[in-house]
Image: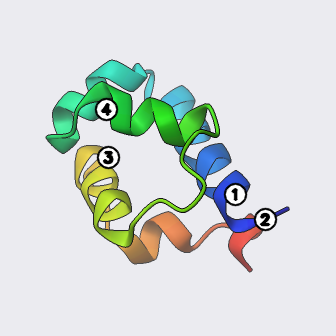
């Protein structure tokens, strides 16, 4: 699995676990919904770490917690 696919999977899993939509995550993260959807739908081939950090903020978690996941090991 490549890194972008792992990021996509992690976001989707966290949304499912926390029962929040992509739009709600984007709102919590202070990002346009299109930014998050571009990662989810594979249009963003190389998401910036600053975008991932904002997504982590939207989940109320650290980058370390986000990447402490089996797919990134």
Nearer the observer, 37 or 9: 37
Mark nearest the camera among 1 and 2 is 2
Q: Is residue 7 left or right of residue 15?
A: right
> Which of the marked residues, 4 or 1, is nearer the chain's N terminus?
1
Disc 4: which residue: 25
Q: Of the numbered discs in the image, which one, if any, rests on residue 2?
A: 2
Tell me which residue sits at (47%, 64%) in the image: 66
Q: Are marks 1 and 2 in contact (CB under 8 Å)?
A: yes
- Percent position of residue 61, x then y: 31, 60
Asked if 46 appears above or below 42 in the picture, the reply is below
Mark nearest the camera among 3 and 4 is 4
Q: Of the numbered discs in the image, which one, if any, rests on residue 6?
A: 1
- Inspect this view and state whether residue 20 appears: no
Q: CA distance from mark 4 to mark 1?
A: 18 Å
Tell me which residue sits at (54%, 47%) in the image: 44
Q: Are marks 3 and 4 in contact (CB under 8 Å)?
A: yes
> Which of the marked residues, 3 or 1, is nearer the chain's N terminus?
1
> Which of the marked residues, 2 or 4, is nearer the chain's N terminus?
2
Q: Mark 1 packing: few (<14 Cα in 10 Å), some, or many (20+)?
A: some
Q: Mark 4 packing: few (<14 Cα in 10 Å), some, or many (20+)?
A: many
Give SS at disc 4: helix
| Quadrant of the image occupied by residue 69 | bottom right
Q: CA distance from mark 2 to mark 3?
A: 22 Å
Q: Are marks 2 and 4 in contact (CB under 8 Å)?
A: no
- Percent position of residue 53, x then y: 30, 64
Q: Mark 3 packing: few (<14 Cα in 10 Å), some, or many (20+)?
A: some
Q: Is residue 60 left or right of residue 35?
A: left
Nearer the observer, 6 or 16: 6
Q: Of the numbered discs in the image, which one, if any, rests on residue 59?
A: 3
Q: CA distance from mark 2 to mark 4?
A: 23 Å
């Amino acid at each position: 699995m490549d890194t972008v696919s792992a990021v996509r999977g992690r976001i989707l899993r966290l949304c499912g676990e926390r029962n929040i939509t992509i739009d709600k995550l984007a709102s919590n993260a202070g990002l346009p919904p299109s930014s998050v959807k571009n990662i989810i739908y594979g249009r963003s081939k190389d998401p910036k770490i600053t975008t991932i950090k904002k997504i982590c903020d939207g989940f109320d978690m650290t980058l370390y917690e986000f990447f402490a996941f089996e797919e990134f090991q």
